[in-house]
Image (spheres, rainbow, N blue to C red):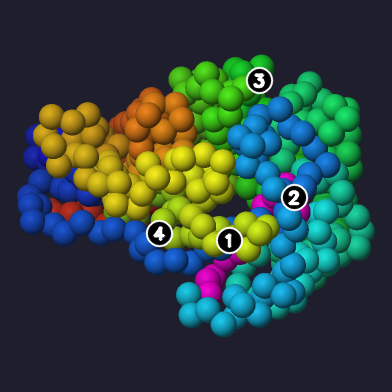
Amino acid sequence: MKKIEYSLNNKNKLYFLPKYNRFAMNNYDIDIQPDYYDTSLVKLRLEISHLCNGRCKYCLVYGNNVETAEILDVKEFWKYLNSQEWFKNIKKIFIIGGEPLLHFEEISYIIDHFNGKISFSTNGTLLTKEMVKKFAESNVKVYISLDGPEFEDNINRVYVNQEYMYPDIIKGIDLLREYDVKFGIFMVAAKETIKRAKDMILKLDEKYSPARIGYSLPHWTPDYKDTSLAEEFRDVLLGLYKERKRIKAEIPQLKWRLNPLCEGKIKKFSCGLHTTQTTILPNKSIIRCSKIDNEKDDLKFKVTNDKLNQNSPIELAKDDKSDCSKCIALACCGGGCPFDGMKRFNCLTDKRECVITPPLINMAVNDIVEKFNEKKIEVPDGLIEPKIINDLLWR
């Protein structure tokens, strides 16, 4: 797919170039250079422990038998990290688990000794005033796991004893709001609720005013291996796209897919597992991703860095007969999660992205064309600045 042509009027034509995520008016330089996102290592995913007070039914850690019994001695390991040249370039630390708040002392140590951005995900049930005051003072980003605004939306979130977490999660959110801590909400799509997910997200936005509401497909586990939900998830994102200008929270799953279009850049990979991020496990191992490099699985021998590089959509599109070469979302896609690709489809592309991303990009492109018509925007012949596209989509 070299270009898609839209007639604005008798004199002007608008072109979209999927390979470059760029728009052009009338004449344009056909020898434009692709602008790729920076793939420097800047993010550290820190798994202090896999211990958790919950057993959520779709948990990828327990569902895929990834967990270990170790607890990372952060104070001791910090000396090693500070001696590493690559660590000096780390700008973000994202703490995950297990349940990170089982190890508040370790989190506090990181807050006191790291100058970059710190965030962590938690089920929120263990939050205390002491913790929340610390987070308020340090500007840490807290992401609460919650699958919807009502009790019945959260039946997959349970404690070890199988009692429901929902009442305690809400207490945690109320505590964050009381101390004015900015927080986000992480939701996981479930077959029981996905049909009303858009309305659930709008209600959460109105009720709690979180900075971000993430809505993700569940990763593969033996119990969820056949739960694709791709078509339903696509419809949720399309609905949220139409509502995007009145939603106060950022919806990452929209931004991740639309940002390349708005910035005129090319996303080679959806996941930074072998480029922008690295992971530290409780046993001090430094790996790409605990799902891919899980010692209880053989995926690490199948998902090598060379194979990942060779199987990005941009590389696959070099074959003119490939589906990627004909896709309007070519440079926005990145191929999805390699772990889910291998587990669900026995390839390095999570083919759910083929269902989800092209319709979203197609809707955005047609929206942009319509706004060019409506606003009679005048731009010089040639490539259109990404800022113009960004303003049309989000302002």
Per the rendering, the mark at residue 193 is: 3
Q: Earlier in the sequence, mark 4 or mark 1?
A: 4
**Residue 126, percent across and down?**
87, 49
Query: Which marked residue is nearer to the observer: mark 1 or mark 3?
Result: 1
Q: How far apart are marks 4 and 1 (CA)?
A: 17 Å
Q: Earlier in the sequence, mark 3 or mark 2?
A: 2
Q: What element carries label 1?
A: loop
**Residue 331, percent across and down?**
28, 45
- Check disc 4: other Cα within 10 Å, few if <14, some if 14-19, many if 20+: some
Query: Which marked residue is nearer to the observer: mark 3 or mark 2?
Result: 2
Q: Which of marks 4 and 2 is nearer the N terminus?
A: 2
Per the rendering, the mark at residue 275 is: 4
Q: Is mark 4 on a helix, strand or loop?
A: loop
**Residue 16, percent across and down?**
20, 41
Residue position for label 2: 69
Q: In the image, what residue type sits under mark 4?
A: Thr
Q: How far apart are marks 2 and 1 (CA)?
A: 14 Å
- Left or right: residue 40 versus residue 183 is left
Is residue 196 covered in magenta? no
Residue 341 position (above or below residue 23): above
Q: Earlier in the sequence, mark 1 or mark 3?
A: 3
Q: Distance between the residues labelled 4 and 2?
A: 28 Å
Q: Which of marks 2 and 1 is nearer the N terminus?
A: 2
